[in-house]
Image (cartoon, grey):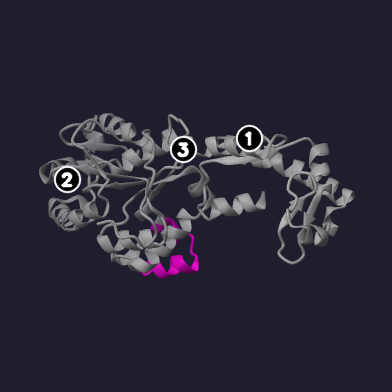
């Protein structure tokens, strides 16, 4: 079971798990008949696999670890581990009776591993969301996370959380965040890869937004072997972005968000205390849009299989479009570490 957890922490999530089972008496009998060639290390069996060469047959030895007591001990340990393994791999594990001819066992195993699972949800989805400011990345990430129990990762929020923890890395990035400067890519990547390596991300999947912002960051993310299974670009024109974002304000008392045109404050009292974020001014937005579009083409080229969805519509309509692409079978092959997707 420890090995299974280690695999998950390393991001190794199998699509198929096969459990070969047989009665204890059969397993003990097989163990008694096992023989080893001390020269080559090849394993034989007195009933099932016996060497044709008499010279090899004469030098076969029985392993000292194959005593009946040791065999029973190993079986007891195996029974304890199997329960946990069944629970860990419940969605992809198949039990196969090993007390039958080897050819039949092999055929059943091969048939299973060549099959594709059918599911209404993506299997360990790894989702990247791109889009200009105000396109709804945070909301869509939240909706995906809520429905499919994936880990919602906003890069800026992750950096703020690390800074608040007052760790050594938090102390390193604190001056950048306080001064409004960009945190160096090397630090961001270390923080992000550490988070993506956590057990919840490797087992439940993740939806990431706010990173990568340019081609170099995308390449570094891939080199770290964090390769998305789905990439979405939420499309929106600059005019719509400015109208949507620059007219949005927040009630500091309740935290509710309002919009001058589409969701005005319910009363003059609330209207009087609304606050606008400086970064949402039209001048700041134009600069952020300029930076986004400067890198958008290279990111789209790096992720040629990305899906483009109009974000200039009702948020739930956008989510339905995203979801329709999330539940289709994952591609059979994905970019490998170090491969340039251009």
Residue 227 showing in the rendered view: yes
Q: Which mark is residue 246?
A: 2
Q: Nearer the observer, disc 1 or disc 2?
A: 1
Whether label 1 touches label 2, CB < 8 Å: no
Of labels 1 and 2, earlier in sequence is 1
> Residue 266: image x %, image y %?
24, 29
Secondary structure of residue under mark 1: helix
For the stretch drawn in magenta, the main secondary structure is helix
Secondary structure of residue under mark 3: loop
Secondary structure of residue under mark 2: helix
* Region rendered in magenta: 159-175
Q: Label 3: which residue? A: 149
Q: Nearer the viewer, residue 97 or 237?
A: 97
Tell me what residue is drawn at x 50 percent, y 65 percent: 167
Q: Quadrant of the C terminus?
A: bottom left
Q: Quadrant of residue 123?
A: top left
Tell me what residue is drawn at x 41 percent, y 55 percent: 226
Q: Nearer the observer, disc 1 or disc 3?
A: 1
- Residue 289 is left or right of residue 177, and the answer is left
């Amino acid at each position: 079971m420890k090995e299974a957890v280690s695999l998950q922490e390393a991001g190794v999530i199998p699509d198929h798990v096969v459990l070969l089972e047989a009665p204890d008496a059969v397993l003990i009998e097989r163990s008694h008949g096992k023989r080893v060639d001390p020269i080559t290390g090849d394993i034989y069996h007195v009933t099932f696999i016996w060497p044709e060469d008499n010279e090899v047959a004469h030098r076969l030895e029985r392993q000292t670890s194959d005593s009946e007591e040791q065999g029973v001990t190993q079986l007891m340990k195996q029974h304890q581990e199997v329960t946990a393994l069944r629970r860990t791999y419940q969605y992809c594990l198949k039990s196969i009776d090993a007390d039958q001819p080897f050819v039949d066992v092999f055929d059943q195993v091969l048939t299973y591993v060549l099959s594709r699972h059918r599911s209404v949800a993506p299997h360990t989805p790894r989702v990247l969301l791109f889009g200009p400011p105000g396109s709804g990345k945070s909301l869509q990430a939240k909706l995906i996370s809520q429905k499919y129990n994936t880990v919602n990762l906003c890069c800026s929020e992750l950096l703020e959380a690390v800074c608040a923890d007052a760790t050594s890395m938090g102390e390193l990035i604190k001056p950048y965040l306080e001064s409004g400067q960009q945190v160096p890519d090397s630090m961001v990547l270390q923080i992000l890869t550490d988070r993506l390596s956590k057990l919840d991300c490797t087992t439940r999947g993740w939806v990431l937004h706010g990173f990568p912002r340019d081609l170099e960051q995308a390449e570094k993310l891939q080199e770290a072997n964090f390769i998305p299974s789905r990439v979405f670009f939420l499309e929106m024109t600059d005019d719509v972005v400015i109208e949507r974002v620059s007219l949005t304000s927040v009630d500091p008392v309740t935290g509710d968000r309002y919009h001058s045109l589409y969701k005005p404050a319910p009363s003059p009292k609330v209207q009087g205390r609304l606050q606008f974020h400086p970064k949402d001014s039209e001048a700041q937005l134009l600069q952020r849009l300029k930076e986004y579009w400067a890198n958008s083409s290279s990111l789209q080229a790096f992720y040629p299989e990305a899906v483009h969805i109009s974000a200039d519509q009702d948020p739930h309509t956008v989510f339905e479009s995203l979801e329709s692409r999330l539940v289709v079978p994952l591609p059979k092959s994905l970019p490998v570490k170090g491969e340039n997707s251009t």
